[in-house]
Image (cartoon, helix red, strand yellow):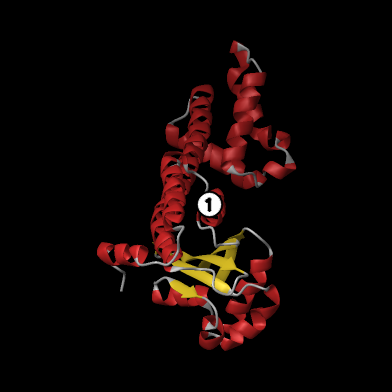
Amino acid sequence: MAASGSEYFSMLTNSSDNDADDVLLSVADTVSALADALSTITDVDATVERICLDAVDSIDDAEAAAVTVVRDSGPATICSTVEGVLDVDAAQYETGEGPCLEAIATQSLVVANGTTPTDRWPTFTRRAAGSGFQSFLSAPLAIDSDYYGALNLYSRQPDAFSTVDAAAMRIYVSVAVTALSAARRAAAAQAQVQRLLGAMNFRAGIEQAKGIVMVMLNVTDEKAFDLIKWRSQETNTAVRVLCRQLLADVAANPLLDQSVSAEFAKLLMTAHERVGEGAK
């Protein structure tokens, strides 16, 4: 169960760490800077990288950080500040145990110092012994139903992470989750805008070409589109590509009044011949 505000206050005031104020001030500065950046966040990968770097900067006892996300194929490390922690994470994924996986499974903060890792996850600890990391602090990142994982901190010291670090981590992660959520929404919105623009451009080109066919050949809207589809099927050229080429042909070929229909009909019948092979 998450600790209340009064419990956090008790944890901090009773802590034996003399630098508790410095730690929390550092986290406060980092949280403030991250909050200021929320309005300009558009890139998920860049946001994850910043979260890792800022976590190491704001929590002094942390020597490295990484973010794990859970995908259909299982957990994966998508960002790390040093390559050495990749071996630690791999050991967790291979053995199915460790601080990161426990934080994700229980949706609670996990602190593992001293002999705790060996006692709780012996197989993982043996597998990761060569990395040199002995202390771990992992917090769940619950962004949405299909994007969740954990922020993980690592230290080579045997008793690195204090109750102050744990409290600071909770504060930092709450803002990190907000930042990642904003980045995800921004990325989704940007992708949707690009799809809409693509669809608009697609339809615009077809409508323009169809209008020209109607005017040049004196046919109905339906007949004009039937002609375009017929040439598309006959020549195995995508409708949008054929229309784009037709518009380019019309722009490049001023037509004489006496032979407008004949000249345009020729352009329509041969437009596919001027389409590049890669565009069909």
* Residue under label 1: 54
Query: Where, by quadrant of the figure, is residue 242 drawn?
Result: top right
Q: Position of residue 144 (x, y in %)?
A: 39, 61
> Quarter holding the C terminus?
top right
Q: Position of residue 53 (x, y in %)?
A: 57, 53
Out of 139 and 24, give the one closest to the viewer: 24
- Residue 147 in sight here: no
Q: Position of residue 13 (x, y in %)?
A: 34, 63
Query: Where, by quadrant of the figure, is residue 11 drawn?
Result: bottom left
Task: Work out whether 150 lies above or below 34.
Answer: below
Task: Count the numbered circles shown.
Answer: 1
Out of 111 and 219, give the one closest to the viewer: 111
Left or right: 4 in relation to 175? left
- Secondary element at image label 1: helix
> Could you tell me which residue is drawn at 68 percent across and 73 percent down?
131
Left or right: 123 in relation to 199? right
> Could you tell me which residue is drawn at 39 percent across and 72 percent down?
108
> Quarter holding the N terminus?
bottom left
> Could you tell me which residue is drawn at 66 percent across and 60 percent down?
82
Q: Residues within 10 Å of mark 1 (few under 14, many from 20)?
A: many
Q: Position of residue 190 (x, y in %)?
A: 47, 43
- Residue 107 in sight here: yes
Q: Residue furthest top?
A: 257
Task: Work out whether 44 lies above or below 208.
Answer: below
Task: Work out whether 181 lies above or below 111.
Answer: above
Left or right: 199 in relation to 76? left
| Amino acid under disc 1 | Asp
Task: Work out whether 180 lies above or below 11.
Answer: above
Out of 205 and 195, give the one closest to the viewer: 195
